Image (spheres, rainbow, N blue to C red):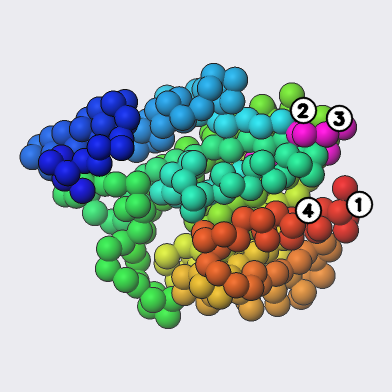
C-alpha cells in the first residue's frame, strides 16, 4: 500500500497513524544511524503503554531499564497463584508469536498472569558498531547446525543478557508475592534455556513449577547442557516442544527426556505438541497441557 492509494474507508485517525508510520519508516531508511540508537525494549514498553490502559500494566525498574509488566488477575474468587510468562528473546511482548494469548486463558482457570518482555541483547559475536540490531537479531545470521561445534555466541553479551534476565526475574518474583498461591514460570526458547541454567546454578529462587517451551541455545556445547539442567532441577518441570521447532530444540528433545529418567526426576513430563507450529494457534492447546499437568499434581 502506498500513500497515494490509502483506502477511503480509513478513518481520519487511522490515516494519520498510517502517514506517521510511513514517514517514520522513510526517516529510518534514509538515516540508518537512527536505527542503531533505537532501544527495542523501550519500544516494546511504549507499545504496551499505547495499547493498554494504565490499570492493565505496571512499569518496573529493572536495573537501569523500565520494563512494562502486563498484569491480568484471576477470574475466579480463589486464585490458584501466579504464572510468570516470558517469550523467547526478540519476540514482541504482545505479538501473536509471544505468550500473550495464553494470559486470558490462564485467568479463566484461576491464575493471575504477569507477562513481561525478556532482555533484548544481540548475543552474536559481531560488534554493535558493525551492524544494526533489531529485536529479531538475537542469533548469528549464518545458519549453524546442531552438529557444528563452533563458537557463535559472544561470551560477554551472553553474560550481560543473563544478568539482565536475572534482574527481571527477581523483580517479577517480588511482584508475584503480592498474590496468594503457587508461582509458576512459563518461558520459551532461549529464555527457557537461560532460566534452567540460572535455577541450576542457584542464581534465582526456584518457582513452584517451571514450564519450558522449545528450549534451545544456538551453540552446540551450550545446547547440550540443557538436558542436564532439566534433569537436575529441583522443581516440577513440564517440557513442551513441537515438530516444527528449530533444529536446536529437536536435537536435544530425546536427550532431555532420557536425562530426566536417569536422574529419577519426579514430576517431569515431556509433551510433543501435535499440529501447527507453536506460534500459530497453539496457545489454547499449550494452556490445556499446563493446566492439566498442574491439576495432576493436585494444584
Residue 255 falls left or right of residue 180 = left
**In the figure, residue 47 lies in which quadrant?**
top left
Query: Around disc 1, counting alpha carbons within 10 Å, would you say few (fewer than 14), some (14 to 19), or many (20 or more)?
Result: few
Residue 285 in view here: yes
Type of secondary structure dominating the magenta stretch: loop
Please give the name of the residue rendered at 79% of the width and 44% of the height, measured from the top-left corner.
109
Q: Which residues are magenta?
A: 74-84
Q: Tell me the element at label 4.
A: helix
Residue at the outermost right position = 298
Q: Tell me the element at label 2.
A: loop
Residue 279 sits above or below residue 199 on the image: below
Residue 289 falls left or right of residue 227 = right
Which of label 2 and label 4 is nearer to you?
Answer: 4
* Circle 1 residue: 298
Instruction: Indicate which disc residue 77 carries.
Output: 3
Q: Position of residue 193 (x, y in %)?
A: 55, 57
Amino acid at each position: 500500500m502506498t500513500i497515494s492509494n490509502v483506502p477511503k474507508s480509513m478513518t481520519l485517525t487511522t490515516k494519520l497513524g498510517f502517514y506517521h508510520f510511513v514517514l517514520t519508516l522513510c526517516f529510518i531508511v534514509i538515516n540508518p544511524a537512527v536505527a542503531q540508537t533505537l532501544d527495542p525494549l523501550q519500544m516494546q514498553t511504549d507499545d504496551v503503554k499505547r495499547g493498554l490502559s494504565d490499570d492493565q500494566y505496571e512499569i518496573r525498574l529493572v536495573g537501569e531499564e523500565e520494563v512494562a509488566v502486563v498484569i491480568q488477575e484471576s477470574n475466579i474468587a480463589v486464585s490458584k497463584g501466579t504464572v510468570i510468562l516470558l517469550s523467547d528473546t526478540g519476540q514482541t511482548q504482545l505479538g501473536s508469536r509471544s505468550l500473550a494469548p495464553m494470559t486470558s486463558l490462564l485467568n479463566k482457570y484461576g491464575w493471575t498472569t504477569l507477562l513481561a518482555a525478556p532482555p533484548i541483547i544481540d548475543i552474536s559475536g559481531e560488534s554493535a558498531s558493525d551492524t544494526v540490531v533489531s529485536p529479531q537479531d538475537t542469533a548469528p545470521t549464518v545458519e549453524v547446525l546442531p552438529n557444528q561445534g563452533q563458537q557463535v555466541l559472544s561470551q560477554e553479551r551472553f553474560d550481560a543478557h543473563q544478568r539482565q534476565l536475572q534482574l527481571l526475574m527477581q523483580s517479577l518474583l517480588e511482584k508475584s508475592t503480592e498474590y496468594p498461591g503457587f508461582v509458576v514460570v512459563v518461558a520459551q526458547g532461549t529464555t527457557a534455556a537461560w532460566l534452567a541454567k540460572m535455577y541450576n546454578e542457584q542464581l534465582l529462587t526456584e518457582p513452584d513449577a517451571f514450564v519450558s517451551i522449545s528450549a534451545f541455545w544456538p551453540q552446540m556445547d551450550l545446547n547440550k547442557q540443557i538436558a542436564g539442567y532439566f534433569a537436575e532441577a529441583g522443581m516440577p518441570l513440564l517440557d513442551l516442544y513441537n515438530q516444527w521447532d528449530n533444529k536446536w530444540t529437536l536435537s536435544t528433545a530425546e536427550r532431555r527426556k532420557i536425562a530426566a529418567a536417569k536422574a529419577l526426576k519426579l514430576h517431569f513430563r515431556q509433551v510433543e505438541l501435535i499440529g501447527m507450529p507453536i506460534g500459530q494457534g497453539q496457545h489454547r492447546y499449550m494452556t490445556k497441557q499446563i493446566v492439566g499437568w498442574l491439576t495432576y499434581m493436585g494444584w
